[in-house]
Image (tube, helix red, strand yellow):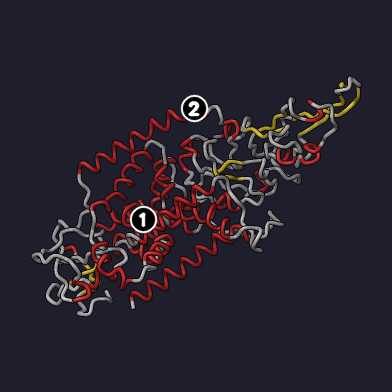
Amino acid sequence: MVTRLRRLSQIVIFISFVGLLLRTKLFDFSDTINRPSFPGNFFFKLDPLLALTNAVAGHAVYYGLLWSLVVLIPTFLLGRFFCGWICPLGSLNQFLGGIRSESGRRRTLIAANRYKKWQATKYLLLIAGFVAALCRINMVSWIDPFSLLVRSAGLSILPAAASKKYYVVCQPHYWLSVLLCVAFLALLAMNLCVTRFWCRALCPLGALLGMASRWSLVGLHKDAATCNRCNRCLIACQGGDDPIGGAMAEGGVSPLPELRGGMPARKPAISLLSYR
Amino acid sequence: MEACPHGSLQFRFFRIAETPPEIAGTNLTRRNALFALVTGLAAVPLLGAENVLRKKSVERAIRPPGALSERDFLSRCIRCGECMRVCPNDALQPAFTEAGLNGLWSPVVTPKIGYCEPSCVLCSEVCPTGAIQELTPHRKGWVAGDGVPDTPVRLGTAVYDRGICLPWAKATDCVVCVEWCPVAPKAIYVEDARVVDAEGKSRMLKQPHVDLNRCVGCGACEYACPIQGQPGIYGTSSGETRSIHS
């Protein structure tokens, strides 16, 4: 039920995001003065990272970005719901991560979904970016997921996909967009190796929300009494979450033969690491 | 959660109480955090030094109407490219080196590709961070009509390259830039001049000049200039209003 709701939310938000992005060029410009107002920047306003770095680097709180409290405040209670339910780049990553059939990846999925130390990179990016923003260099917002997605998709992918030559909906072309395209496709391709690689390793917004959710009230709980460490949850979780309260046994034996694979039988130690 | 056949997983309130403290952290070591802090600090003077080099090209980095002063603009612009997408003339293009490393992918008006449409303020409307402050067509002040302010928003000033421009350099008639100038009254005026052509014959033609008081820097003249490659007139950011007001 929760999974279905989440997928529905991801699909609806992703489609409306792409719709808004396309509309930036489908607008009727014939009358530039008497046209309806246009919420092209709606999604950016929900972004707490932009609100924070903009206020710190620009020495001013921009009124539109106060909308981001709608995301930030519930994060204190619910954790990083934004990443799984709203973020369009997260949805895209998750979709691409699921392309390679799970049956073929089961063994590697268990290994891939365990917490890795390099997943802390995003916190380092956030700290470095925040310190630079204090000195008015706001580079961390360049890799904000909304900024990255709109820039890459809007300036390189969509123009390439809808060239004037072949489609009615023409998209303009932009200077050196091929660089944006290559970097973006590389990030997306990483999903085939590590599901949601961007979200786990690099996303500074995810890092910020992760810090905000440190004391969140709701979280995934595992009942250690009934769990037989089959590791099914590790296969299912795209975010690579280790459920709190007795996580997967590190290198432990799965009772399911198809999952047992070649993993060494070690003592079923409780992992102290969690994806947060 | 639904993958678990035993129903062992569920969302719960107040799970912190039963969680060992080691799990709740972000797995940041102090050394790594310090490394990130120093990296962030080091980036600042490095990019600052680069700003000095930017002087050689900054004249050509024309910013969209409503943009804050350069320093504020760069600190607020998140390089999302929304302004470039909504621009009806595709005048706004992502900068590569034009505005320095710190200005990578920031929007610059590129008159060769498109000029700034006089009645349009879409880029200022979609900017999510206020790097381009919201304008109205009235405040922009480029369209003739009642109550247009005395001080229009200026992106800069157009400059003639008299070594390239046809009436100036090649004794050839051309008033394309005058025809395209959207400002009313026009910001380009012509002067009758007697010139000597390649055969040594003396003749009269009209040589264009930019009226510095009226030019708003939209770049329509550069866009329209019929000369291939380096144009005979080009937009610069000198005289832009944001350098005065903010």
Residue depicted at 56% across the width and 41% down the height: B67
- Quadrant of residue A162 within the rendered picture: bottom right
Residue depicted at 12% across the width and 64% down the height: A270
Residue A130 location, x and y as percent?
35, 43
- Specify the label residue B169 is tagged with: none
Q: In this view of the protein, which residue sits in the foreground, B245 or A226?
A: A226
Horizontally, residue A275 falls left or right of residue B121, namely: left
Helix, strand or loop status at disc 2: helix
Position above or below: B64 against A154: above
Could you tell me how far apart the alpha carbons at marks 2 and 1 are, in whole angstroms?
33 Å
Position above or below: A114 against B125: below
Horizontally, residue B200 falls left or right of residue B72, namely: right
Most extreme residue toward the left is A267
Looking at the rendered image, the quarter that the C terminus of chain A falls into is bottom left
Residue B230 location, x and y as percent?
69, 33
Mark 2 on the same chain as mark 1: no
| Numbered disc total | 2
Q: In this view of the protein, which residue sits in the foreground, A204 or B3?
A: B3
Q: Residues within 10 Å of mark 1 (few under 14, many from 20)?
A: many
- Amino acid identity at mark 1: Trp
**Disc 2 and disc 1 in contact, CB within 8 angstroms:** no
Most extreme residue toward the front is A262
Horizontally, residue B126 falls left or right of residue A66, namely: right
- Specify the label residue A198 is tagged with: 1
Horizontally, residue A188 falls left or right of residue B69, namely: left
- Quadrant of residue B66 within the rendered picture: top right
Helix, strand or loop status at disc 1: helix
- Specify the label residue B53 is tagged with: 2
- Amino acid identity at mark 2: Leu
Position above or below: A48 against B31: below
Residue A84 location, x and y as percent?
36, 65
Residue depicted at 31% across the width and 50% down the height: A122
